[in-house]
Image (cartoon, grey):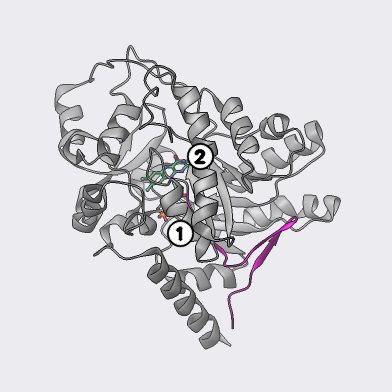
Amino acid sequence: MMLKSVQIKNRTLEIPVIQGGMGVGVSLSGLAGNVMKNGGMGVISAAHPGYRHPDFRKNPLRANCRAIVEEVKKAREISQGRGLVGVNIMVAARDYKELVQATVAAGADAIISGAGLPLSLPEYTHGADILLAPVVSSGKAARLISVTWDKRYSTVPDFVIIEGCMAGGHLGFKKEDLATGSCQTLEEILPQVQQALQPYREKYSKNIPVFVAGGIYDGADVAHFIRLGADGVQMGTRFIATEECDAHPAFKQALVTATAENIAIVQSPAGFPGRAVVNKFINDTKQRGNIAVQRCLACLTPCTPGNTPYCITDALIQTVSGNIDNGLVFTGTNGARIDGITTVRSLMTELIAEAEKALQEEK
Ligand SMILES: Cc1cc2nc3c(=O)[nH]c(=O)nc-3n(C[C@H](O)[C@H](O)[C@H](O)COP(=O)(O)O)c2cc1C
């Protein structure tokens, strides 16, 4: 069986693979454009895409909004007209509304929004021709977002990403559940989300495709979740270990050498638990206590510079720039399985072939 393309409202996603948005600077136009070129959805992270712009420290919002427009344009050039381009905007971003508006102005195909519930997202897009997708970790969250959008804006999500507990970056689960391994699995959450969306599919006569994320490694995983009723997958960590990923090669190498034993749950200053490689930086923060914030960029809520353990923006800029020992290396559990660097083309080709083989075998 061939992998099916996914119709999302007025757009077609040729290959049902979304590359997850990864900040700071891990997924910019280099990675996103190449995923698009191979038929998937490339996603640019709106978490400080302007971090290399000369005016970034002086006016981060202006630099980031300009960068969104530039990166979307570059991604489309690289894609040679294939695929879709999305921008990932965290609800926890203090300048959420402005970043959404810059994404609409950039002419992106989609906004994917998690790290909080994007309850007001449709208000900021004003009916623009852009797909809106929340990232959820439970059926309850999918229901709450749908109820709210329906009531307030007479609309519902165009597609939904379910992010499970094996993902990288900030996680939508309780620290205790992550520690005890008692989070719901993607297999458990998927039917709950499908059920939550069903009344809205009927009310709006609209397909609301669902993509699963967190721990998807190979084409067999893609086939597994398609069989369970997902429309496709979103993958982050595997795309980091590609030549085209926008992070410094030392970041990619940190995943090649990472093992299951040195990947752990850490507390992010944004208040969410996150998953990262336990490196010198993580050990230092444990031993030395808080690292004073030099200059706050007012990036995430509810971070307060006076008592934050460290500045997450600085920590992520360090790693994406190659200073691995002194920064935060976010990764999914798959970081332990990465054993080399590949190209986006090879990875996409392999995923498609493996998924089609697995779907074929099942028939
Ligand atoms: C380095 C890194 C940075 C990430 N940054 C973000 C982000 O800025 N916003 C977001 O919503 N998700 C972020 N994520 C989550 C990814 O978009 C994706 O959903 C997740 O990594 C999927 O799980 P996987 O890594 O196991 O494939 C990040 C993940 C990683 C590994």
The earlier-in-sequence mark between 2 and 1 is 1
Nearer to me, 184 or 124: 124
Region in magenta = 1-20
331 in the magenta segment: no
Residue 305 point in image, percent of width and height: 35, 15
Quadrant for the N terminus, please: bottom right
Residue at the extreme top = 306
Identify the image quadrant of the C terminus.
bottom right
Residues 185 and 348: in front is 348
**292, above or below 356, in the image:** above
Answer left or right for 334 relative to 143. Answer: left
**Along the horizontal axis of the image, is 43 left or right of 265?**
right
Q: Nearer the viewer, mark 2 or mark 1?
A: 2
Residue 268 in picture, x, y percent from top left: 35, 31
Q: Is residue 11 magenta?
A: yes
Task: Look at mark 2 in the image and give the residue it sits on.
Answer: 70
**SS class, disc 2:** helix
- Above or below — where is 157 with respect to 318? below
Report if the beta carbon of the residue with label 2 is closer than 8 angstroms to ligand 1: no
x 46%, y 27%: residue: 63
Mark 1 sits on what residue? Answer: 34
Label 1's element? helix
Instruction: Find residue 9 and report its horizontal and vertical position in percent.
Output: 74, 55
Residue 219 at x, y percent in the picture = 45, 72
